[in-house]
Image (tube, rainbow, N blue to C red):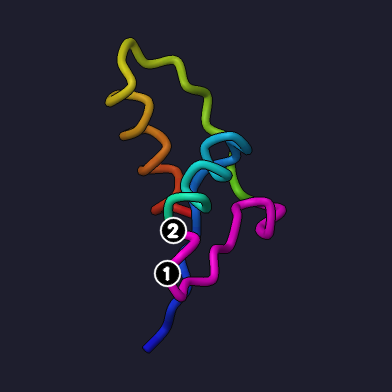
Amino acid sequence: MINELILATLNKCKAEEIKSILKDLNITIIPMTSFPNYPVTTEDGKTLEENASKSNRSSQIF
């Protein structure tokens, strides 16, 4: 079983929060900073949901 999780965020605070929540699980967390060509998404949506969808699409293409 593979126990790796790629965090599709460049937000350091968000990444640390997620790592803290998952700390007791046997999961290796791989930050997006491990991927130097990861596209930076301009979050210009009107809502959190719009920005999340936009970031998600960028991650899927990458």
Residue found at x 37% / y 43%? 56
For residue 57, above or below residue 62: above
Task: Give coordinates of residue 18: x percent, y percent.
Answer: 47, 47
- Magenta span contains residue 25: yes
Q: Name, please, the residue furthest toward the right.
A: 36
Mark 2 Cα within 10 Å, few/some/many (few <14, many 20+)? few
Q: Amino acid at mark 2?
A: Leu
Q: Name, please, the residue furthest toward the top.
A: 46
Mark 1 Cα within 10 Å, few/some/many (few <14, many 20+)? few
Residue 22 - label: 2
Quadrant assignment, res 40: top right
The one of 54 and 21 positioned closer to us in this rendering? 21
Task: Give coordinates of residue 19: x percent, y percent.
Answer: 52, 53
Q: Quadrant of the N terminus?
A: bottom left
Q: CA distance from mark 1 to mark 2?
A: 6 Å
Residue found at x 68% / y 51%? 33
- Magenta span contains residue 56: no
The one of 49 and 40 positioned closer to us in this rendering? 49
For residue 33, above or below residue 43: below
As helix, strand or loop, the secondary structure at mark 1 comes to loop
Residue found at x 33% / y 21%? 48
Location of mark 1 (residue)? 25
Whether residue 2 sits left or right of residue 49 in the image: it is right
The one of 39 and 26 positioned closer to us in this rendering? 26
Q: Amino acid at mark 1?
A: Leu
Is the C-beta separation of discs 1 and 2 under 8 Å? yes
Question: What is the span of residues highlighted in magenta in the rendered image?
Answer: 23-37
